[in-house]
Amino acid sequence: MKNSLSSSSEATVSRVLLTGVEPFGRNYMNSAWGACRLVAESPPEDMQLEVVLLPCAFGDSIAELRKKILRVEPELVISTGQGGSRPDVTIERVAINLKDAEGADNNGNQPIDEPIVADGPAAYFSSIPVKACTEALLKAGMPTSVSHTAGTFLCNHIAFGLGRLIATEFSDRRGTARRTTSATAGRASAKDSIACHGMPPADKIPHPASTEPPSANGQGLMNDRG
């Protein structure tokens, strides 16, 4: 991961917020968080990286994400989540304004057919080239595809919330590149985002057992779930 990212002449983003999510349901580990920890242990060179674990909870996850964006002031936000039935990494193109949970979140909430934002738009689309991001990951040897649905649980909830934050609070800080879903190239000034979903289950990737955020090049880590 470190070599493939740092070797790209387009990898100019220097301050990145990388989020994962708490384990949920019957999962003892969230593989997306495991992947975040691996990146934190060997981050791309010349990058200030903050890794954050978000709560697996409707509402709370977006509120926590907003706090971290305000504190870190990232040029790029990469949100990851676990999609146990997906065989590859999927880069999300769109997040919809819907909460429709098949099971409860970690606070016991199970919204059915509810909007995330009552007066919000139907969806937020990624604004950086998701196909170019997919191609870059494929060239790096990682099975990857574009996804047109992040579901209606926490992965979609966080992606929509991030889109909402960018549209309503942080649009003045946007730079050349804009919002995406997995890995971005080019300069993104202030709150560009990407959502990455569909990582394999926790037993399919190597990961540290601890959920404590490690440090990357002296930078802190924090919390997320998918």
Image (cartoon, rainbow, N blue to C red):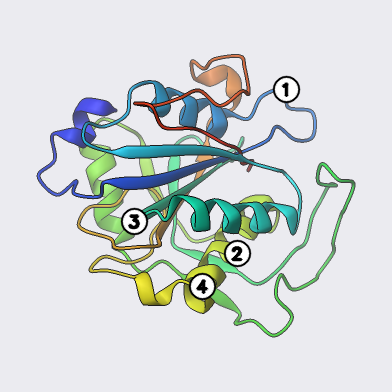
98 or 12: which is nearer to us? 12
The mark found on residue 124 in the picture is 4
> Which residue appears at 41% of the width and 27% of the height?
40
Could one spot residue 151 in this view of the protein? no
Q: Check disc 1: other Cα within 10 Å, few if <14, some if 14-19, many if 20+.
A: few
The disc label shown at residue 161, or none: 2
| Neighbour tally class for label 2: few under 14, some 14-19, many 20 plus, Cα within 10 Å | many
| SS for dot 2 | helix
Which kind of residue does numbered mark 4 sit on?
A: Tyr
Instruction: Give the structural element (helix, strand or loop) at label 3.
Output: loop
The reply to whether callout 2 and callout 4 are in contact (CB within 8 Å) is no
- SS at circle 4: strand
Q: Which residue is mark 3?
A: 75
Disc 1 to disc 4, C-alpha distance: 31 Å
Sequence order check, earlier mark of 3 and 4: 3
Which mark sits nearer the N-terminus, 3 or 1? 1
**Image quadrant assignment for residue 132:** bottom left
Label 2, label 1: how many angstroms apart (C-alpha)?
Answer: 25 Å
Side of 95 relative to 172 (left or right): right
Mark 2 or 1: the one toward you: 2
Give the amino acid type for the residue marked by disc 2 in the picture: Gly
For label 1, the residue is: 28
Single out the residue that lies furthest toward the right: 108
User: Where does residue 172 sit, x and y in percent of width and height?
Assistant: 38, 77
Q: Nearer the viewer, mark 2 or mark 4?
A: 2
Q: Which label sits in the foreground, 3 or 2?
A: 3
Disc 1 secondary structure class: loop
Mark before the other along the chain sequence, 1 or 4: 1
Local packing at callout 4 (Cα closer than 10 Å; few below 14, some 14-19, many 20+) is many
Point out the frontmost of discs 3 and 1. 3
Amino acid under label 1? Tyr
